[in-house]
Amino acid sequence: METEDFNALTGDSSLSEENKYGLKWYSKYKCSSFLLCLLYRTGLLVESDKTFGSKIIFRMLLLLVLLANTYRAYSYFAYPSKIISDLFFRINFIQFLSYLLSIAMWYAMRRKRKSLSILLCRLRNSHPFTRSRLQTFLLLFACSMPITFEIMARITMARKVAGSLDNYYFSIVLFSLLSWVQIIMYPMWTNLIVLSYGLLCQTICRQLHLLRAHIEKCPPQEFTILMQSDVVKHELKINLSVQLLQKVFSVPSFFMACSHFCTCITALGTIILLGSSKLPFMILIQISFMFVNACGGLLSCLWMAGGLPREASKLKDAYCRKLQQRRLLVGEEGAACFEKKLLEISSYVLSGCNIISFYRSSILGLAGTILTYAVLLINSH
């Protein structure tokens, strides 16, 4: 890595009081980032409350979400319990929790919009929402497929329900609009938050990687007290960004994990219980996609957030190794305070409400937990 790249990513992030929440940097950056513009339009940044257009869009989204949830609750629970089997009711109830958790996720992030604005302003030089082609493709695929499946399912349903041609087209439009709002709420909204969370984690991982590369490239003779002090200062700045990230996403990441977990066990339980013989092909494809999407969201969160403690551990090892090399060559003992300071840094472990800790080693355990709960859901029937 070049020295200028290191300085650009880990440079001074101090903010003046006037530009504390990033109005100036935001006006330059928002047009080039879809995710940042989305956070702005959905009321998750401090700047969201300062323009009339954003307020209108924000309130319209709230109204649509309220109507969609009312419709979803009615479609799930309006019929007498004798008509609906206990298993069907349990599956629908667990799936309904995913939509409620998505709303709770948005509300939790809105409460922390000031901290989120400060975090994005601190990371502004790193351009955290810059996506690779693969990430862009996966985002478009994950957002478009639920809408496509829902349209095809509604067309099939409307053919059976509608008695005339006018009712046929009206049914398609009405049910598709209601379904689109539900899909935007879950899984699209949850996917976008997972992607934002993952990109921010990836940006901080890159900063830790650049700091480690800067240490490894430095000759032992030049690894002086001043250099060690500079490394510790940069690490403290990165650590502050991690603390802000945890503060903003602690509750939303917990809701996201619960939401995707509910979808995983209901989708897997439905597929195992009914199988391809009892489910229409389009419904089977739709349920399978929801299962893959939920598993992918959980895996992405664990992998991206789990990369932070891994990079922090590598940084500590690189620092101690370089310090030992200098001691062997120079015999300097005055850097013990900086060594102790760096070894005392946090492990950079992110968590959801201090209940779920995000480690890469938890992926296999998560797979076993999903399978276990899906089997329990079926056996209880």
Image (cartoon, rainbow, N blue to C red):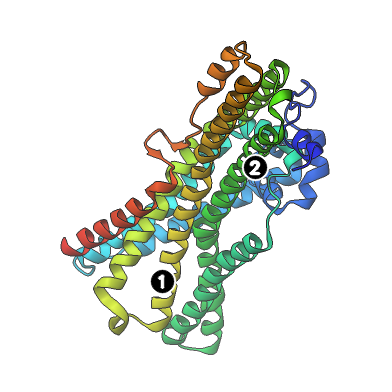
Rendering quarter of residue 169: bottom right
| Image disc number at residue 19 | none
Q: Are marks 2 and 1 in contact (CB under 8 Å)?
A: no
- Quadrant containing the N terminus is top right
- Say which amino acid is labelled 2: Arg
Residue position marked by numbered label 2 in the rendering: 206
192 shown above or below 238: below
Give the number of callouts: 2
- Quadrant containing the C terminus is bottom left
Other residues around mark 2 within 10 Å, as few (<14) / some (14–19) / many (≥20): some
Viewer-closest of 263 and 167:
263
Residue 379 point in image, percent of width and height: 16, 63
Name the residue rendered at 62%, 15% in the picture: 331
Name the residue rendered at 38%, 59% in the picture: 263
In the rendered structure, the answer to whether residue 288 lies left or right of residue 133 reads: left
| Image disc number at residue 288 | 1
In space, the residues marked 2 and 1 are separated at their CA atoms by: 34 Å
Residue 293 point in image, percent of width and height: 47, 63
Rendering quarter of residue 220: top right
- Counting residues from the start of the chain, the first of labels 2 and 1 encountered is 2
- Say which amino acid is labelled 1: Ser
Residue 207 point in image, percent of width and height: 66, 38
Can residue 216 be seen from the camera position used here? yes
Viewer-closest of 151 and 340:
340
Question: Mark 2 against mark 1, which lies toward the viewer?
Answer: 2
Please, what secondary structure does the residue beneath circle 2 have? Answer: helix
378 shown above or below 56: below
Rendering quarter of residue 26: top right
Can residue 80 be seen from the camera position used here? no
